[in-house]
């Protein structure tokens, strides 16, 4: 089975690379401005390009309107799927596929592009403890308004909460198939509320007050404050020194049980080299699972661009689900390779060794595809 997975990965890589070359040659012969589907998404088209409204509505900037209160409309789609082979030291093996993200999206900009309405709906999200099959699939339902060029306010359910740095990443932004243990345990959730997001040259912040339920499960059980502040000290000289980001996240609230957690993190990028690390500690937490446990963890991850479209990755990931029991800990060692044939397509292959203190160790091979338009 491992051979089949590796052969499939190589075949997809070669096919994508070959298709890319053929496409560029044919379009160069025809002397067209539009090169690839990726160019459409990333907005490398202008009003002089003879492209139908049906195509424009899928571009990064959407279908634009002149002399109208509505400035643009955009339709998109996110897709994410995993194939996981697991071998446990007790002799059991399994092969599982998981199509976890099939999300159409709709964005409408108005009021001179200062305001936006958005809706994203994950058709395949499955949260077993949630009784409402409609609301649990809503990824985003929000209105934003730009106060200045650096600040905006958000009302509704927007992106993932920044309760941890890694947990706030969208699936396409992740360097690995799975988030770190602290990211997927403490974070990786959405909630409805009021949010202020700001991006400045030397720092960013994202603070919000939310209903403490996740994915609109049952409103009114408590409030949640979650915030993230990030500093960028080398913003002026990052071309020489590399880009350094560091900061902290904090989350405090009540959802049947009180909880609070914090994390500190660092991210550094220098040309082809990328590094991220984060430490988090929780006195109760409210992720997909709500828990009274004291828990904590740490990860260090690095990546190296060996080719413009090919990246090697590695991560050390340590997590303690219950700090009251010092013998209860899990360590994951992951090596991977990531291939990006286009800007909006990602193919990942990871190998993870999981060392469990209270259960059998396991080995996993994970193959994943990510796409967004």
Image (spheres, rainbow, N blue to C red):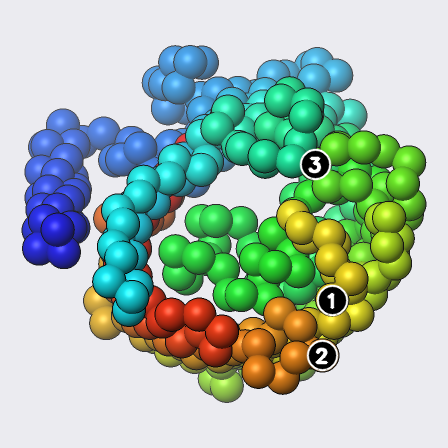
- SS category of the residue bearing label 3: loop
Horizontal relation, residue 257 to residue 73: left or right: right
Cα separation, mark 2 vs mark 1, equals 8 Å
Which of the 4 image quarters holds residue 128?
top right
Tell me what residue is drawn at x 48 percent, y 49 percent. 171
* Mark 2, other Cα within 10 Å: few <14 / some 14–19 / many ≥20: few
Query: Could you tell me if residue 303 is visible in this image?
Result: no
- SS category of the residue bearing label 1: strand
- Whether label 2 touches label 1, CB < 8 Å: yes
- SS category of the residue bearing label 2: loop
* Mark 3, other Cα within 10 Å: few <14 / some 14–19 / many ≥20: many
Residue at mark 1: 293
Q: Nearer the viewer, residue 166 or 286?
A: 286
Which of the 4 image quarters holds residue 191?
top right
Image coordinates of residue 318 in percent, x first then y, are: 52, 77
N-terminal of the two: label 1 or label 3? 3
Image coordinates of residue 192 in percent, x first then y, are: 79, 38
Image coordinates of residue 151 in percent, x first then y, are: 79, 51
N-terminal of the two: label 2 or label 3? 3
Residue at mark 2: 324
Query: Which circle marks residue 47 in the picture?
Result: none
Circle 1 or circle 3, nearest the eye: 1
Residue at mark 3: 215
């Amino acid at each position: 089975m491992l051979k089949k997975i590796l052969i499939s990965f190589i075949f997809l890589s070669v096919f994508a690379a070959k298709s890319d070359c053929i496409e560029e040659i044919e379009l160069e012969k025809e002397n067209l401005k539009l090169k690839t589907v990726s160019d459409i998404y990333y907005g490398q088209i202008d009003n002089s390009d003879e492209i139908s409204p049906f195509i424009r509505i899928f571009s990064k900037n959407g279908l634009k309107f002149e002399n109208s209160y509505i400035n643009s409309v955009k339709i998109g789609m996110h897709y994410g799927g995993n194939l996981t082979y697991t071998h446990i030291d007790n002799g059991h093996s399994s092969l599982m596929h998981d199509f976890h993200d099939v999300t159409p999206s709709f964005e409408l900009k108005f009021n001179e592009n200062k305001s936006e309405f958005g809706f994203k709906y994950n058709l395949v999200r499955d949260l077993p403890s949630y009784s409402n099959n409609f609301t649990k699939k809503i990824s985003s339902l929000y209105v934003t308004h730009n106060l200045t060029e650096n600040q905006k306010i958000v009302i509704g359910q927007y992106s993932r909460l920044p309760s941890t740095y890694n947990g706030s990443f969208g699936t396409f932004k992740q360097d690995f198939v799975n988030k770190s243990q602290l990211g997927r345990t403490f974070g990786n959730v959405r909630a409805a509320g009021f949010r202020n997001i700001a991006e400045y040259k030397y720092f960013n912040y994202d603070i919000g007050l939310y209903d403490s339920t996740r994915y609109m499960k049952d409103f009114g059980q408590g409030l949640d404050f979650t915030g993230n502040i990030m500093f960028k000290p080398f913003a002026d000289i990052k071309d020489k020194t590399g880009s350094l980001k560091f900061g902290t996240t904090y989350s405090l609230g009540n959802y049947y049980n009180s909880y609070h957690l914090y994390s500190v993190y660092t991210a550094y990028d220098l040309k082809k080299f990328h590094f991220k690390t984060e430490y988090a500690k929780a006195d109760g937490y409210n992720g997909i699972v709500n828990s009274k446990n004291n828990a904590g963890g740490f990860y260090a991850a690095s990546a190296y661009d060996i080719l413009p479209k090919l990246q090697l990755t590695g991560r050390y990931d340590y997590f303690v689900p219950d700090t009251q029991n010092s013998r209860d800990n899990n360590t994951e060692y992951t090596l991977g390779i990531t291939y990006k044939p286009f800007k909006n397509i990602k193919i990942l292959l990871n190998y993870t060794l999981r060392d469990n203190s209270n259960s059998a160790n396991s080995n996993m091979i994970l193959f994943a595809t990510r796409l967004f338009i």
